[in-house]
Amino acid sequence: MNPQKKQIKSNIAIRIKEVREAKNLTQFDLANASGLSQAAISQYEAGNIALELLPIIRMCDGLGCTVDYLIGRDAEYGGDTPRGRLFTAFSKMSAEGQGMSVDMMEFLVKDK
């Protein structure tokens, strides 16, 4: 494995554990929330196996964070920040509510 890919895998492993612990979740809790096994969560956190897209999405759903945060493209995972509160609320909305929210945000940005 090339050094860049190894570093990315290591960063993802660190962030999975960081977010899980910040949310006071056990590996078992995350396994239940993501539909993955506790053994898989342990292997991902140890950096022993690389995540594919579907497990990443499931893990993010279980952690309540974005894929961008987990892969290192975003500095905030959510939590009690405005972005985190927005992400949490948005993820709980119906498709219709999400569409209306996006329309409203786009209107507010254009109005500025």
Image: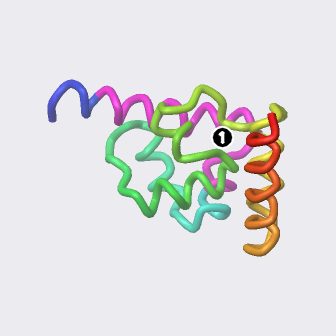
User: What secondary structure characterizes most of the magenta part?
Assistant: helix
Nearer to the camera, 46 or 101:
101
Q: Residue at x 56, y 54 (%)?
A: 59
From the image, which quarter does the N terminus lie in?
A: top left
Q: In this view, does 105 lie to the left or right of 15?
A: right
SS category of the residue bearing label 1? helix
- Residue 104 in which image quadrant: bottom right
Say left or right for 60 vs 39.
Answer: right
Residue 91 locus on image (x, y percent): 74, 60
Is 53 on the left-hand or right-hand side of 81? left
Q: Residue at x 75, y 40 (%)?
A: 109
> Which of the pair 47/106 is nearer the observer?
106
Would you say residue 60 sits in the magenta stretch? Answer: no
Give the image location of residue 31, x and y in percent: 60, 59
Q: In this view, does 13 lie above or below 67?
A: above
Q: In this view, does 58 lie above or below 88?
A: below
Which region is colored magenta? 7-30
Q: Name the residue under label 1.
A: 20
**Tag 1: amino acid:** Arg
Between 9 and 96, the one lying in front of the other is 96
Residue at the front extreme of this rendering: 111
Q: Which residue is drawn at 65% across and 45% down?
A: 65
Colour basis: rainbow
